Amino acid sequence: MKRIFYYFIFLIIPFYTYSENFSLLGKYIPDLYCTFDEVDIGETTITFTFKISDEIKRIKYKKSHNEGLLYLNLSEKLPKEFSEEYYYEKKSIETSNKIMILAGKRMESDDLLLFGTTSGYYKKEPFLIPGHFEWSNKYKDCSSFLIEKNKKYDKENLSKYEVDTPWVEGVKGDGKGEWFIIDNHFVYGYLLIMNGYISYEKPYLYKQNGRVKQIKVTGENSGKSKVLDVLDTPHPQTVDISFLSEPEDIRVEIVEVYKGSKYDDTCIHYCTTFTEEVIPYENSIE
């Protein structure tokens, strides 16, 4: 009997830890640059309602993972008219039959932080996006950043939610000890983080590059400091910084990393102060 119980524990706990925490089903309001008025994710079908014509488009889909990132694979390509760019200078816009989804659940309000990215959309920004992503911190300084083929992965990238725009430390090795400073004037209980290098067209870059496993968060005025664990997932998650009880700039330092399979560079896609706990859709890329 004991042996059966232990088997049960060993099977159930990993399944719970690495399975989805909540459902993505429901209705969402797209970004202003999207011509859809509403996106309704059902069990097997996504329903798109157009703003202008009130036309309804239903497309079947299946979920899949590519290098740890979640995709909704559609049975057909998105219509070209889904982006406002189609109606202006880019009539030959190319679309895809894949939508990359990143999601987190706000624990107090029970709302989802959800955005979907696909090809053919405005500046590679997500077309499903909640309003809170539109504001973010500024960043005073960082210890280093990577410059590669005239592309800078500087600290300002930490406030961007477009794909392929992480902050990447710029020293040899895995970047332990590298840091950035958040220009902060309010008291927030959490840091909202999207880990790693997130790319729609090159999802393998998430695993190939390093991700943060532990960070040291320090108040620049108070000197209060804690080492906090970060999950290995690209989905939005929070770490608790409620020990910082006064408005002050916040230093975030890399302490430990999840090693990249190909590169030593350690990346953080997004990091800002936030008001409530957020759990990621999936806790691990594995």
Image (spheres, rainbow, N blue to C red):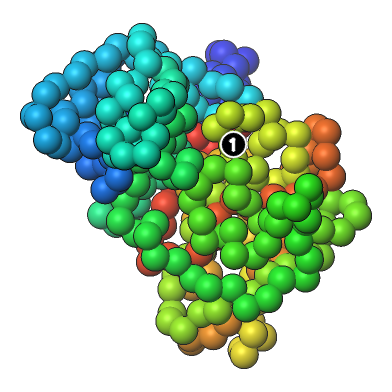
Residue at the spot 68% in from the left edge and 70% down from the top edge: 180
Left or right: residue 178 compared with residue 23: right
100 on left or right of 213: left
**For this view, does 184 lie left or right of residue 6?**
left
For the point 64% across and 74% down, which residue is it? 181
Against 199, residue 158 (above or below) is below
Q: Position of residue 46 (x, y in %)?
A: 26, 21
* Image quadrant occupied by the C terminus: top right
Residue 15 can be seen, yes or no: yes
Measured from the top left, where is residue 272 in percent x and y? 50, 64
Q: Quadrant of residue 258?
A: top right
Quarter of the image that includes the N terminus:
top right
**Above or below 188: residue 65:** above
Look at the image and tell me whether residue 243 can be seen: no
Q: Would you place residue 8 above or below residue 214 in this image?
A: above
State the residue in front, 141 or 81: 81
Q: Amino acid at mark 1?
A: Ser
Which residue position holds label 1? 199
Vertical placement of 110 versus 48: above or below?
below
* Element type at mark 1: loop
Residue lying at the far top of the rendered structure: 75
Residue 81 locus on image (x, y percent): 27, 28
At x 52% / y 61%, what residue is drawn? 159
